[in-house]
Image (cartoon, rainbow, N blue to C red):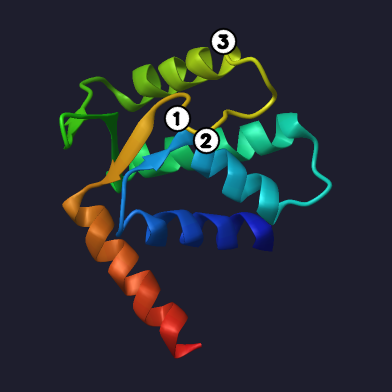
Amino acid sequence: MKGVDTARTEILLEGLDDYIGIWEIAFVMDESLPGTEKSEVRAASLDFVKEVLESGLMEPGYPRDGRFRALDGSSSEILARVRHEWDDLSGDLPDVGEGMWFNLTEEGRVYAHRLDELDQRE
């Protein structure tokens, strides 16, 4: 899906400037897939999280005291935690500040910079 690819790029580029919350991933996916059921937005968001964790592009965690505190755990453990947190939310999609956060790894920064260069050429 072109919409999902565009959303993935947008999220990774945003990661160059700041940490990314699961709510932002869901928001970008929702905006990129207009008219899509919220369950499909959730699935696309979780697929993205799985992809970036397994590829080592992002690390999970939470900002604390002005720093990003990464969580330990396998990709499947982290994904299960994200799913569980999402299930506990009041709405279909997370609100700002709800749920887990993600930070680009060094490999993710290199990858996002390459995406940015390609984006600027087009």
Residue located at (35% from left, 80% from top):
117
Location of residue 44 (image quadrant): top right
- 96 left or right of 15 in image: right
Looking at numbered disc 2 in the image, what kind of residue is underneath it? Answer: Trp
Q: Earlier in the sequence, mark 1 or mark 2?
A: 2
Residue located at (36% from left, 22% from top):
78
Looking at numbered disc 1 in the image, what kind of residue is underneath it? Answer: Gly
Q: In this view, does 118 lie above or below 21?
A: below
* Viewer-proximal residue among 78 and 120: 120
Residue located at (49% from left, 15% from top):
85
Q: Mark 1 points at which residue?
A: 97
Residue 9 percent coordinates (x, y): 48, 61
Assess disc 2: are there few (<14), some (14-19) or many (≥20) residues with their C-alpha within 10 Å of its C-alpha: many
State the CA–CA distance, disc 2 to disc 3: 13 Å
Q: Mark 2 points at which residue?
A: 23
Residue 115 percent coordinates (x, y): 39, 71
Quick one: quadrant of the N terminus?
Answer: bottom right
Q: Earlier in the sequence, mark 2 or mark 3?
A: 2
Assess disc 3: are there few (<14), some (14-19) or many (≥20) residues with their C-alpha within 10 Å of its C-alpha: few
Q: Mark 3 points at which residue?
A: 88
> Is disc 1 in contact with disc 2, using a CB cutoff of under 8 Å?
yes
Q: Is residue 39 above or below residue 88?
A: below
- 89 left or right of 113 in image: right
Looking at numbered disc 3 in the image, what kind of residue is underneath it? Answer: Asp
What is the secondary structure assignment of the residue under circle 2? helix
